[in-house]
């Protein structure tokens, strides 16, 4: 599994790098607008954080002020409140603009994501459907069969890998997505039949099947 996972991760990384380059070349205006909006949102968030800290400091000072200093301290609090509200409005506008620029790139970004998933399935499914093994399973000396012991066909091979790949894709390869995908595969550790959740759905099972090695001898 480690070998197969490494291959898939490399495929995804290469696809993402190539996709990012293509998007930059084909959508330069949208890409530049997205970068600018991202920088503006970061700056607005920092300004809001600074305004909130200034307001907190002014409130603390006002709570301790006495006599003639009290009125001045309260006026400063009001000033800081207005500054914070202004920073919040600026942050909201920056967030909306960032979302707008992200939407403009959603189509090509989704296309790259789908391409990554298709490449992962292309690596996993055909070899499993034909031989019951991926390269990683061949190295481990195991293979996939139907739960009734019959050889695998295309649909069970496809459905077996669709769940973990779909979960990771749906969550955009985020840490939760990867964890859920790995969880569906590693379920066999707690399953009495040593089946992952994807095995149960596709009605498959992994069995030991060492690959015969060719021995060369002298004549």
Image (cartoon, rainbow, N blue to C red):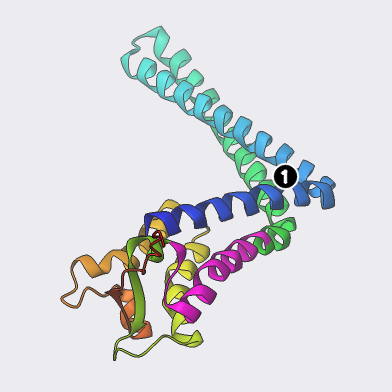
Q: Position of residue 29 (x, y in %)?
A: 84, 46
Q: Is residue 144 visible?
A: yes
Q: Position of residue 130 (x, y in %)?
A: 50, 80
Front residue of this view, candidates 11 and 30: 11
Density class for disc 1 (Cα within 10 Å; few <14, some 14-19, many ≥20) is many
Residue found at x 36% / y 69%: 212
Which residue bears the numbered disc 1?
34
In this picture, is 181 found above or below 41?
below
75 or 160: nearer the viewer: 160
Query: What predominant SS class does the magenta segment belong to?
Result: helix
Dot 1 falls on a residue whose secondary structure is: helix
Using residue 3 as the reference point, say whether residue 105 is left or right of it.
Answer: right
- Residue 48: x and y, percent? 54, 31
- For the point 66% across and 47% down, the residue is 17
Left or right placement of residue 193 versus residue 76 in this view: left
Asked if residue 40 lies left or right of residue 159, the reply is right
> Residue at position x 41%, y 62% from top?
219
Residue at image position (51%, 73%) is 127
Q: What are the residue bounds of the magenta stretch? A: 112-135
158 or 197, which is in the foreground?
158
| The one of 102 and 121 positioned closer to us in this rendering | 121
- Outermost residue, front side: 219
**Residue 125 lies in magenta, yes or no?**
yes
Q: How many marks?
A: 1
Q: Position of residue 63 (x, y in %)?
A: 33, 19
| Residue 64 shown left or right of residue 85 in the figure | left
Q: Residue furthest top?
A: 68
Can residue 173 be seen in the rendering of this structure? no
Look at the image and say whether residue 5 sits in the magenta stretch.
no
Task: Tell me if residue 102 comes above or below residue 131 in the rendering.
Answer: above
- Against 151, residue 216 (above or below) is above
Quarter of the figure that contains the N terminus: bottom left
């Amino acid at each position: 599994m480690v070998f197969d996972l490494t291959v898939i991760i490399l495929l995804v990384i290469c696809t993402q790098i190539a996709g990012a380059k293509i998007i930059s070349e084909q959508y330069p205006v949208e890409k530049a607008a997205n970068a600018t909006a991202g920088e503006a949102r970061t700056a607005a968030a920092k300004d809001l954080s600074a305004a909130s800290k200034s307001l907190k400091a002014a409130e603390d000072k006002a709570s301790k002020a006495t006599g003639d200093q009290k009125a001045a301290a309260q006026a400063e609090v009001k000033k800081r409140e207005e500054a914070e509200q202004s920073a919040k409005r600026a942050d909201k506008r920056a967030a909306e603009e960032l979302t707008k620029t992200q939407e403009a790139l959603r189509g090509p970004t989704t296309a790259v994501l789908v391409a990554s998933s298709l490449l992962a399935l292309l690596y996993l499914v055909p070899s499993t459907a034909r031989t019951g093994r991926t390269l990683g399973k061949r190295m481990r000396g195991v293979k996939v069969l139907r739960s009734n012991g019959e050889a695998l066909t295309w649909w069970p091979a496809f459905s077996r890998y669709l769940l973990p790949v779909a979960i990771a894709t749906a969550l955009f390869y985020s840490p939760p997505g990867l964890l859920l995908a790995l969880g569906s595969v590693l379920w066999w550790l707690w399953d009495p039949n040593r089946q992952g959740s994807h095995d149960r759905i596709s009605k498959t099972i992994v069995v030991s099947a060492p690959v015969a090695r060719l021995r060369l001898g002298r004549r």
